[in-house]
Each structure stands twice: as C-alpha cells, then as structure tokens.
Image: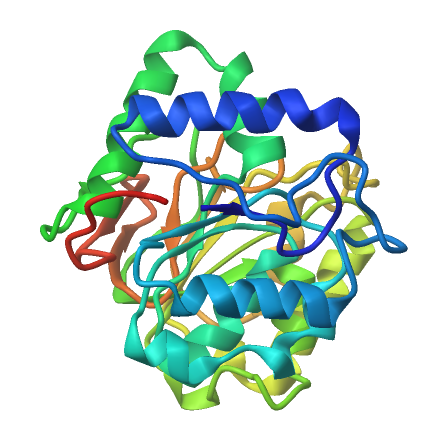
Amino acid sequence: MIASLSGPLPADYERNVEQTVVVLERMGFRVRRSPLLEGGRQRWWSAAAPAEIAAELNGLLRDPEVRAIVASDGGQTAFGYLDLIDFEAVRADPKPILGYSDISLVHLALYARTGLVGFHADMAVPGFGGHWQDAPAARRAELETLYSRLLTETEAIGALPASSPWECWRAGRAEGRLIGGVVNRIALVQATRFAVPLDWFDGAVLFWEEIGGHTSHVWSYLQVMRHSGILDRIAGMVVGVPRDIAGLEASPTLSEIVLDVLGERDIPVLGNVDFGHAGPNLPMPVGIRVGLDAEQRTLSLLEPAVRATASIN
C-alpha cells in the first residue's frame, strides 16, 4: 500500500507515484493506493489533518491484506498523530513501513512502543519514483533485488552494497542494534513520551542523516544527543549522505563536527553511506542487529528484517 503519512501529493508528482507502482510491481508485489493519496489534496502543509492521516494509517495497520506500507513522501505532520496510532494493531499484525524524513518519527515511536522494525528506506515521490529513475540501470537492478529480498526473505541480507565512496571517519568495529533516522527527528522524539528507552541505545549503532539547515544545526542536534546520554551508550555511528546543508563547503566539515562532539568517545564512525535525502537509499531497518567495520567500510545486516511477506498491497 502506498499511503500519505505526512505531506501532500502535488499534482506534478503524480507521475512519481505511477513510477513507484511500476518499480514495486517489477519486484513482484501487488500495489494499491490509499484514499488520501490524491493529487492536489492538501490541508496546510499536510495531505490531511493529523487525525485523518492517523485514521487511514490505523485502517491499514488493521487490514490483514495489507502486508507493507510505503510512504508517499515526508513532511511536517507525524508529530501531530503519534498519539493516535493504534499500537495494539501493530503488535497484533506487525508489518513493515517504508519511508524516511518525517517518517523517522513513526519508525522510532513504533519501535519504542511495539518493537516494530521500521525501514528508513525510499518512498514513492522522492525515492522509487524520483531518485531511482535517475540512477544507473545496474544500480536500480541491485536495489530492486535488495529491497525484494529484505521484504520477503527470512535470512539475513549480510553486507549492504555501496555505490558512493564510504568514508572511515574513525576506525573500529561494532555490532549492535541499528537505531536512527533524520538527526533532528531523533533529537526531538526523545523529548516526548514516544522516546526510545535510553538503555536501548546500549551497544547500538546510531545512524543518521540530514537535509537543509546549517552545519551548526547538525552540531547542535548531536550535542542534544550527547546531553541526553545517547552518545555515551552507542558502540558505533553511521552517517548518511547530506543534502542542502549550508556550510559544508568550508570548515568544519561534517566529519569534523562528528568527531568534535564525540570527543574522547572512541567508537567507529562510517560516513557518506548511501542513505538520506540525496537518494537512492540503502534500507536501514530500525532495530535489527548490524555489523559495522569502519576501516573496511562495511555495514552488514545480521538479522532478517521481516517475517516472510508475500505481497505489498
């Protein structure tokens, strides 16, 4: 199911949704669209009022024929309905939700409340129907195979395939549960009752990415995580490809900012990994165990992300 979980669908992006259907069907899935995914529908900066979005999401969570949910886009709405989500429906029938940006909040809240593995992964408009269309054919084929395996197989994927030059910002190895999302959403959700329990970060591999703003904002969000105790608990860090962040053309660089905030915390850090708003995204399943080797520039998924899934409806 492709659904509007945050921002609206401008009429100009209808083609992106159509392309997404083609991509998912080529992977072998059956695809439907939710009623709110209608070009031109808008309420302020959202596809609908938060209560409407929550009602539709809850219907999808309760529908046994829906086996996975792909967000159409990100935005600025998820904070408005986190308290309206039917967490019991998630526990009764856990199903993967794919998306990033504002959808990071949904992943983190559902993980904290139910243990659901959410996929920080491509969406319809900026992902499958956007960045994927500009990627080389070989990379698209590689990603299609990866997403299909991750959504259907009960075996661990192993090493994720790199396409960009991943960078070792601090050498070392770590193994732990993967937790993260957009850096500002991680910091903000921890200030709510939907926060991931602090001890869940013990030995975890923190992943994050960011779009917009300034390098000083990234520094500040990381400082929030330092003050909250997250950075004292994690065993490693993975940073996605940044997009449209002012200040990156001069010092400090993103790696300098990360190492500055980490200080004496001697943990491996792998940077410029293929996820984030720059897309296409390698899927980052929130909550599964991963193996990180920053010096060898590898990130491996050590557990399956979902139970066997036959189709995306």
Between 62 and 218, the one lying in front of the other is 62
Between 195 and 125, the one lying in front of the other is 125
Q: Residue at x 40, y 89 (%)?
A: 199
Quadrant where the C terminus is found in the figure: top left
Q: Residue at x 83, y 40 (%)?
A: 246
Name the side, left or right, on which 111 lies relative to 176.
right
Name the side, left or right, on which 188 lies relative to 201.
right
**Which residue is the extreme one toward the top?**
137
On the question of residue 57 being in view, the answer is yes
Query: Could you say where residue 304 lies in the image, as x and y percent from the top left?
Result: 18, 56
Whether residue 154 is situated above or below residue 57 in the rendered picture = above
Q: Residue at x 53, y 40 (%)?
A: 123
Q: Residue at x 64, y 40 (%)?
A: 242
Query: Could you say where residue 286 lies in the image, as x and y percent from the top left?
Result: 39, 63
Between 284 and 28, the one lying in front of the other is 28
Corner quadrant of residue 291: bottom left
On the question of residue 164 being in view, the answer is no
Whether residue 178 is situated above or below residue 142 in the rendered picture = below
Whether residue 295 is situated above or below residue 89 in the rendered picture = above
Name the side, left or right, on which 218 lies relative to 148.
right
Count up the numbered dots: 0
**Which residue is the extreme one toward the left?**
155
